[in-house]
Amino acid sequence: MIAKSKTFSVLIPDGENPLLFNVINCLSQIKGIKIYLISSLKENPFKHSRYIQHYSYYPKAKEEKDWVNNINIELEKFDIDLVMPIFEDGIQALTKYKNLIYKGRYCVLPSIEDFSIALNKDLLTKHMSNNQIQASKSIVIKPGETFKNESINSPFLIKPTSNSGGGVGIVAFSNEKDIENYFIENKFKINYLVEEYIEGYDICCNVLCDKGKILAYTIHKGIMKGGKIYGPSVELLFLYDDQLYKKIVKLMESLNWYGVANIDIRYDERAKEFKVIEINPRFWYNVDASAIAGVNFPYLYCLHSLGIDFQEPKYDFIKYLNLNGFIKSVKNNKLAIFNFKFIFSNYQLNFILKDPLQIFYRVYYVIKRLILKN
């Protein structure tokens, strides 16, 4: 049970990130939380959200230390309990400079070394191999190198070793010659991973950890794809699988992980086992789905960082349709627009309806940009 007061204030310092919508959806479910935002966007609809205590605009910092200084100004000015970045860049910067944060008021964070392993797919692949954790077979291609394959089978997926969240930068190939031509025609400044495509299905495990121990988790499988083949699913099914969970326990322990993470896994139909694909060491696009299922990760992350105890939450094995999935369903079945039970059962739509001013300004800013563009 929670041992101390549940009310607190939290500063989200990367409020320009699209994940803000999902994280606010989670925190807004808990009464008594004061949410403060820093953003590099002057025109951010969340500036007008009913859930935001105060919005501060700062131009995009040229140096990470300047960004940390902006955080400290806000923490001290409003006496905020905790700073909680939501995306990789912010988490990485805070991990490097946490010793500079005002009165140590930051969320629990992994070491910079462990964070780098989780973030970079080539480092993660080596780490999992060293710790006997099954993963997809892959080859790292450095800038200027040509693709030479001696160990993996076609078809292939290629992806950047970093910054490919949401399926960005992933391309499929059926033969080696096409990959060779791709690397000749496209000059990259970062490492790329050529990965053996696994016949099977995608599944995710989301965790909150302390010293590698899992404090809270959910497992979900995508059952409806969005607009991108390798992007996030728009409809999820929450479930449990013991083989998968034990694999994630081993992975998080090996990383001595602190904080939240979203682990992408592929079930190998041929080998009949789960293989880790990548770790997103941050919040994820369907984090509010986990909250509806029973595990509110942003809230629990804050509680743990503030030293407030909680029991490991259980989650319901529900289906969850996000707003993009709702729109896709209506497009596929026009009559669904007259099904009011279906409409008002959509959780993200309900979040939006409860925060109308934010939505008004979201539409206003879009129209304004279109007018100025023309």
Image (cartoon, helix red, strand yellow):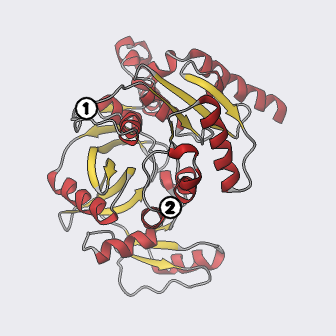
> Picture coordinates of residue 310 (x, y %)?
26, 35
**How many labels sit on residues?**
2
Q: Is residue 128 left or right of residue 180?
A: left
For label 2, count other residues whose C-alpha is less than 10 Å away and answer few (under 14), some (14-19) or many (20+): some
User: What is the spatial separation of the Cα atoms under label 1 and label 2, in whole angstroms?
Assistant: 29 Å
Q: Which residue is denoted by mark 1 in the rendering?
A: 318
Q: Residue furthest left?
A: 242
Q: Residue at x 60, y 79 (%)?
A: 143
Can the viewer see residue 198? Answer: yes
Instruction: Name above or below for residue 29 compared with residue 168.
Output: above
Q: Are marks 1 and 2 in contact (CB under 8 Å)?
A: no
Most foreground residue, 216 or 336: 216
Q: Is residue 96 left or right of residue 277?
A: right
Most foreground residue, 50 or 357: 50
- For badge 1, the amino acid type reads Ile
Report the disc number at residue 170.
2
Q: Residue at x 72, y 50 (%)?
A: 61
Can the viewer see residue 374? Answer: no
